[in-house]
Image: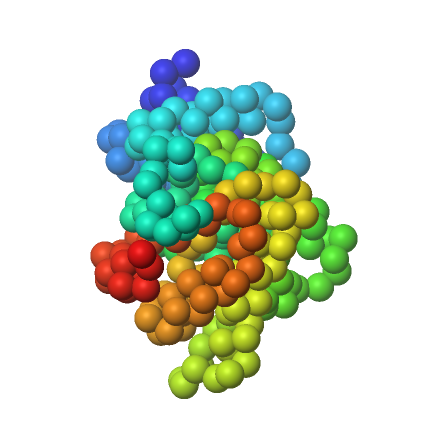
Amino acid sequence: MTQAERRIFLIKKLTAEAPPYSGLPLPADEAGQKKLLRSLLNLRLPLPIGEDFLAVQDAYLREETARKGVTDIDDLTPVEPGLYLWQGDITTLKCGAIVNAANSGMTGCYVPCHGCIDNAIHTYAGVQLRLACAALMERQGHEEPAGQAKLTPAYNLPCDFVLHTVGPIVYGRVTQRDRELLASCYRACLELAQQNGIGSVAFCCISTGEFHFPNEEAAKIAVETVRQTRGDTEVIFNVFKTVDYEIYRGLLG
């Protein structure tokens, strides 16, 4: 199958299993088809799906990631011993584990094509990630509190694992409890990585953006906590926005 054939196959499978979307027209252009496929993946509930779908989905997502270009931690230069700063798409990073800034439901973002990191990670990992997270949450029996961490395979991402953590949501001024919970996110992820023999972890900017933690204060907490608790774990501070890159560059090295 070509990528176009895979994309159309996946769209048809997803619309066929969901009656509300069965009448959606197939866009003629590649960009429209990609947007529709991502939307359908984002909306899909964590339900079982056939091996035929997974085989095509996996081939499609891995090819899409390869086309975007994969960055290997081995090709990066540390800014401090064991610490790296990298600006780019975390879903293209090859390392031990990447950190997902999750919500308390822990099964990903259901808003079609939303710009959050949770949406991107679940999109390019594939439907297996939502299924794995749903199984974790079913066993837990309640929403995920802020400041903890969960570990799953990464499926179609180039990293080996995904660490899911829920950061604090800031309402108005940052409280001391907000600071403690954010630091706890970094500690919990590093501890879980160390318990599972994961040698490198890439952190996104937890709780900034949608959760309203001020970028500079969040970065200070991240760097301080990682320096104190990383042990032998290599850590990548992954940023997407240039403003965050400049903040971390001022704190590191």
Quadrant in which residue 217 is drawn: bottom left
Image location (x, y in percent) of residue 129: 57, 41
Residue positioned most to the front? 81
Quadrant in which residue 50 is drawn: top right
Q: Is residue 66 visible?
A: yes
Q: Residue at x 55, y 60 (%)?
A: 229
Residue 164 versus residue 223: which sits nearer the camera? 223
Image location (x, y in percent) of residue 60: 42, 25
Image location (x, y in percent) of residue 64: 36, 29
Residue 59, placed above or below residue 24: above
Residue 243 versus residue 127: which sits nearer the camera? 243
Residue 214, placed above or below residue 197: below
Q: Residue at x 63, y 67 (%)?
A: 145
Quadrant in which residue 106 is drawn: bottom right
Q: Residue at x 71, y 64 (%)?
A: 142
99 horizontally vs 238: left or right = right
209 horizontally vs 241: left or right = right
